[in-house]
Amino acid sequence: MAIARIEQTPKAPAAAPPPSAPAARRRRRGDFQRKEQRAARAFALPAIVLLLVFVIGPAVVSLAMSFTNARLISPTAPEFIGLDNFRRAFTEDDLFHQSIGNTFLFAALVVPIQGGLGLVLALLVDQKLPGRNFFRTVYFLPVITSMVVISLLWRFLYQEDGLVNSALSMLTAGAYAGRAWLSDPSTAMGAIVVMSVWQGVGFHMIIWLAGLQTIPEEVYEAGELDGTTPWQRFRHITLPLLKPTFVFVLITITIAAMSLFVQVDIMTDGGPLGSTSTIVYQIVQKGFQQQQIGYAAALSLVFFCVVLAMALLQRRLTREKD
């Protein structure tokens, strides 16, 4: 009987074998990756919210309003008018046509001058000369100064009795009588170009300088051992190795030039005779001063398409060929 009872007693289940070391490591790695993903989503959430609220949201609203006759302050609700705003911009608004021409003229002048001058300054301050840090600081000072302050300062400099005319009169021994630079349609845009190049060249000097620092010194030493001249080293070594920097500088200057507004608003108010009016200036004028929000939204969409097309064209022309 005792033996039977012993045989009927159930056996205890065998203990599960301990997990292998590779499986435990994979489990820990998976837990760590999930924690990293949760942390990344938590850190990205504020930026995503801000992007939706202040960039994507307003862009969608502007796109919708461009097809309406919405006004900034109006007792009547906006009405859908289809493509009438775009038809008006391209067929009826002569000032907008002039603003497009002025914007492209400004960009065509500023992009090569500011980009080229920035490269020249970068090459100069990259030389191992005493006091180069002082010149780097001097060239960069206008960049960190408010554009509003600089525009007000240069508006006084361009007056008939301002410093620009006084300096030119002194250099020409009184032969130059002086002129009102910002009141003459033939010189107003050129005056703004000079001021804008002076203000922004320091920023692109720093970008060019950063690009120069990435070029190994051994490359120049090898070129010098081969008997190349400084111009040959610049043409065949410096310029090709600066191509990524060139693309970045070209796109940033173009976008900044196309968005010209502050200088025009403070120095000329779009005049004289619309000679300095730009696309962005017209958008602000129509949207806020004339309260034509729907029409301003349509102009904004046109401006976005123009800048996007130019950026894509520049990228295509400057990309490296396979």
Image (cartoon, rainbow, N blue to C red):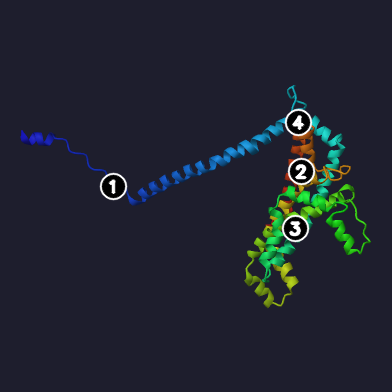
Label 1, residues with CA under 10 Å away: few <14, some 14-19, many ≥20: few
129 shown above or below 26: below
Mark toward the start of the polypeptide (3 vs 1): 1
Q: Which residue is at a point 88% across and 63% down the rendered structure image?
A: 170
Instruction: Give the residue type at disc 2.
Output: Val
Q: Secondary structure at mark 4?
A: helix
Camera-side residue of 308 and 52:
52
Instruction: Give the residue type at disc 1.
Output: Pro
Residue placed under numbered mark 2 in the picture: 306
Q: Mark yes or no: residue 246 visible.
A: no
Q: Which residue is at a point 64% across and 35% down the rendered structure image?
A: 57
263 shown above or below 241: above
270 shown above or below 67: below
Q: What is the number of the mark on residue 294?
A: 4
Q: In x, y percent, where is residue 29?
A: 41, 48
Q: Secondary structure at mark 3?
A: helix
Instruction: Give the residue type at disc 3.
Output: Gly
Label 3, residues with CA under 10 Å away: few <14, some 14-19, many ≥20: many
List the single residue furthest toward the left.
1
Camera-side residue of 30 and 300:
300
Rendering quarter of residue 98 = top right
Residue placed under numbered mark 3 in the picture: 115
| CA gap, disc 3 and disc 1 | 67 Å
Mark nearest the camera among 2 and 1 is 2
Residue placed under numbered mark 1 in the picture: 18
Label 2, residues with CA under 10 Å away: few <14, some 14-19, many ≥20: few
| CA gap, disc 2 and disc 4 | 19 Å
Report if the CB atoms under discs 3 and 2 are less than 8 Å apart: no
Label 4, residues with CA under 10 Å away: few <14, some 14-19, many ≥20: many
Report if the CB atoms under discs 1 and 4 are less than 8 Å apart: no
Q: Is residue 238 left or right of residue 96?
A: left
